């Protein structure tokens, strides 16, 4: 499952249609169902979006009726994408259909709604809607340089605390220790964004192993040197909804001449 599925819809397309949630919903519906059916031959316009979405919804209904596991797969995709797209997912008729299905599923449905709520909360912490499009603020070059110094000190403290554990450190342990270290120390930049960093840790843990941050993994393993600049880029990319390498390049361009 790729995070670029729905969240890969061009931001320019979302901005252009932000006053027309029906188009956004149709775009999301097509992206969701395309994941199940290896692509769909639909081109959405402001004139045909409603009809296209109804056709896509019918296809999804039929597929899930024939193979119930497809509905479960779709639920996982919807929740994963909500971490990035947030409230926009609510504009999709496919999402509405799955929500109605969850409401009839008792305890299992309640668990899906719990995960959905957490995903929406994560989308807020990621900052997707703070400014649209999300700019890399002019001060980020200086912020990165100052935060790197804090990160270097925090990494050393964390490694000492994690080394005291009797068992292999987990992401949950990392989050708890991170919070303890930030609260106890003089780390103004990290403290100001503490909740966002913790949400980044949780999000990264939810990814397939091959997609997780190597820098967080190095912090946990404790053998390799942690590249704090790259760790900052990982977090910035997650927060601003771009790839870490793009974040690095964009921040470099903000360097004072």
Image: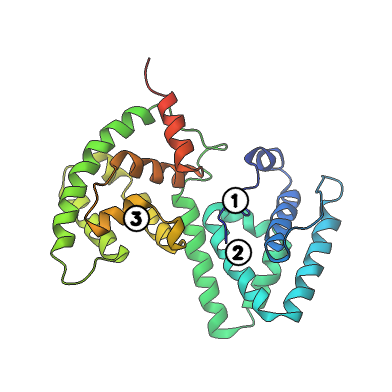
**What is the x, y in percent for residue 117?**
51, 65
Question: Observer-nearest residue: 32 or 88?
Answer: 32
On screen, residue 133 versus residue 191, left or right, reads right
Marked residue nearer the N-terminal end (2 or 1): 1
Are the residues at dot 2 and dot 3 in contact (C-beta closer than 8 Å)? no
Residue 186 visible, this orientation: yes
Disc sitting over residue 7 in the figure: 1
Residue beneath the point at 22% across and 54% down: 223
Report the residue that reaches farthest toward the top.
257
Q: Nearer the viewer, residue 241 or 36?
A: 36
Q: Quadrant of the N terminus?
A: bottom right
Q: Marks 1 and 3, Cα distance to the nearest angstrom? A: 21 Å
Mark 2 to mark 1: distance in Å?
A: 11 Å
Left or right side of 245 for 95:
right
Of all residues, the one furthest to the bottom in this rendering is: 106
- First in sequence, mark 2 or 3: give its number: 2
- Residue 78 circle label: 2
* Farthest-out residue, front: 224
- Where does residue 126 sit, x and y in percent of width and height? 46, 49
- Placement of 219 over or under 229, stated as above or below: below
């Amino acid at each position: 499952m790729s995070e670029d599925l729905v969240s890969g819809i061009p931001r320019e397309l979302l901005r252009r249609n932000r006053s027309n949630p029906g188009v956004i919903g149709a775009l999301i519906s097509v992206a969701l169902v395309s994941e199940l059916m290896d692509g769909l031959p639909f081109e959405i316009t402001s004139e045909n979006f409603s009809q296209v979405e109804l056709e896509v919804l019918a296809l999804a209904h039929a597929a899930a009726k024939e193979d119930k596991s497809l509905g479960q797969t779709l639920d996982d995709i919807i929740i994963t994408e909500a971490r990035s797209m947030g409230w926009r997912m609510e504009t999709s008729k496919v999402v509405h259909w799955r929500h109605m299905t969850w409401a009839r599923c008792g305890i299992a449905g309640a668990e899906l709604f719990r995960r959905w709520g957490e995903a929406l909360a994560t989308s807020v912490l990621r900052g997707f809607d703070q400014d649209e499009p999300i700019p890399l603020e002019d001060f980020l070059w200086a912020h990165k340089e100052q935060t790197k110094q804090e990160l270097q000190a925090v990494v050393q403290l964390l490694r000492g605390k994690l080394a005291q554990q009797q068992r292999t450190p987990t992401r949950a342990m990392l989050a708890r220790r991170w919070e303890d270290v930030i609260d106890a120390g003089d780390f103004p930049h990290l403290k100001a964004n503490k909740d966002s960093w913790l949400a980044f840790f949780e999000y990264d843990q939810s990814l397939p192993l091959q997609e997780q941050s190597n820098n967080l993994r190095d912090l946990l393993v404790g053998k390799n040197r942690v590249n704090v600049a790259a760790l900052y880029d990982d977090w910035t990319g997650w927060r601003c909804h771009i790839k870490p390498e793009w974040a690095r390049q964009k921040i470099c361009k903000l360097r004072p001449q």
